[in-house]
Image: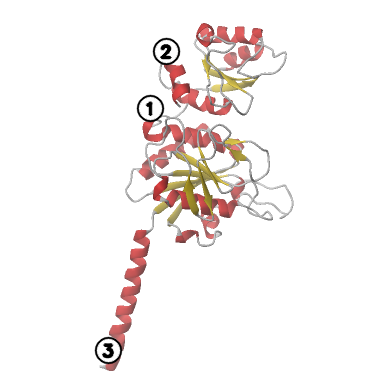
Amino acid sequence: MKSLSVFLKTSMTLVFALFSLLLMAQSKPNIVILATGGTIAGAGTSATGSEYTSGQVKIDAMIDAVPNIRDLANLRGEQISNVGSQDMSVKIWLDLANRINTLLAGKDVDGIVITHGTDTQEETAYFLDLVVKSDKPVVLTGSMRPSTALSAEGPLNLYNAVAVAANPASKGYGVMVVMNDEIHSAKDVRKMITTPVQTFQSPQEGLIGTAIFGQVEFLHKPNGKHTLQSEFSVEGVTSLPRVDIVYACADMSPDLIDIMVKAGAKGIVIAGVGDGNMTTATLDAAKKAASQGIWVVRASRIPIGKVLIRGEVNDKEYGTICSDELNPQKARVLLMLAMLKKRSWEDMQRLFVEY
């Protein structure tokens, strides 16, 4: 009888413990981490050297390398790609967007974290901001130092990104970038410095929040339409129209516009000087391209400030589009999506003001 009593007590203790663990698991949010590669998954031969190769570490190993990260949420990882973000492609963008929309449509996923290289992270973030169809949090993160480097910041960035995605207050903020203890909106974030960890900044609107050792605080809502407010969709889309970027400079040659058109570009973004300006000959070439059905967007090579619709250039007269707040690379993203549908000049210009 005594043995039976001990057995029953032990069994009840184990059942209670298992039940408690089950309740704890159910009380934590469910976050999926989608890995695309980048420096955060990079590895080098020296902890103090600058040479490394991106996309060497798989997502499960990355998660296991972050202490206490599973205390924040129930986690699972998926490997979407494993490339340096200089090789990020439209195909990966479309695969990523469709996978995110599928995951977030389910009740068993509360948020998404994406590990991504920093070179084109702002472009991927903005693309997803326009095509994700959910108000659940989607967070991109990465690192400036590979996993093998001295003081690699990737693990803490990943920890903070999961903390943001798991936080109920993150709902409705659109796609975010979490790096270096800061939360940035997809529209405004820009890579401003080549190699330091404080590379990402939001010079127009400022960062939207902070994430410091998992403690999340939001400061303001992002500017512009995004996610559920967005009119764009990539459901069933297998490719995007070709859009090229040309960098303006003193004595710029107009034949660069002609070369892009002949090469098959359906849209051109000009990273203009100052307020989206260019040489008179280049502006005439842009007008000619626009008259042939090529969308031409005037952006600026200057990192901060708007391009004015009614500045030195009368965009409607030339048939060009003003990028408003978007830098050249984000203007390219918006133009590619906008060109999936036939539009008037007025409708196209509206998009660059609203998004």
Question: Which residue matches tag 2?
Answer: 344
| Element type where label 1 sits in the image | loop
| Element type where label 3 sits in the image | helix
Question: Which residue matches tag 3?
Answer: 4
| Element type where label 2 sits in the image | loop
Please provide percent x and percent y for residue 327: 57, 27
Residue situated furthest left in the rendering = 1
Q: Quadrant of the C terminus?
A: top left
The disc placed on residue 151 is none
Amino acid under disc 3: Leu
Question: Mark 1 to mark 2: distance in Å?
Answer: 16 Å
Q: Is residue 14 above or below residue 134?
A: below
Amino acid under disc 1: Glu
The quarter of the displayed image where residue 38 is located: top right
Residue situated furthest bottom in the rendering = 2
Residue situated furthest front in the rendering = 219
Question: Which residue matches tag 1?
Answer: 231
Residue neighbourhood size for the residue with mark 1, other residues' Cα within 10 Å, grouped as few (<14), some (14–19), many (≥20) = some
Question: Mark 3 to mark 2: distance in Å?
Answer: 82 Å
Please provide percent x and percent y for residue 22: 34, 65
Question: Mark 3 to mark 1: distance in Å?
Answer: 66 Å
Pointer 3 or 1: first along the chain: 3
Q: Which marked residue is nearer to the observer: mark 3 or mark 1?
A: 1
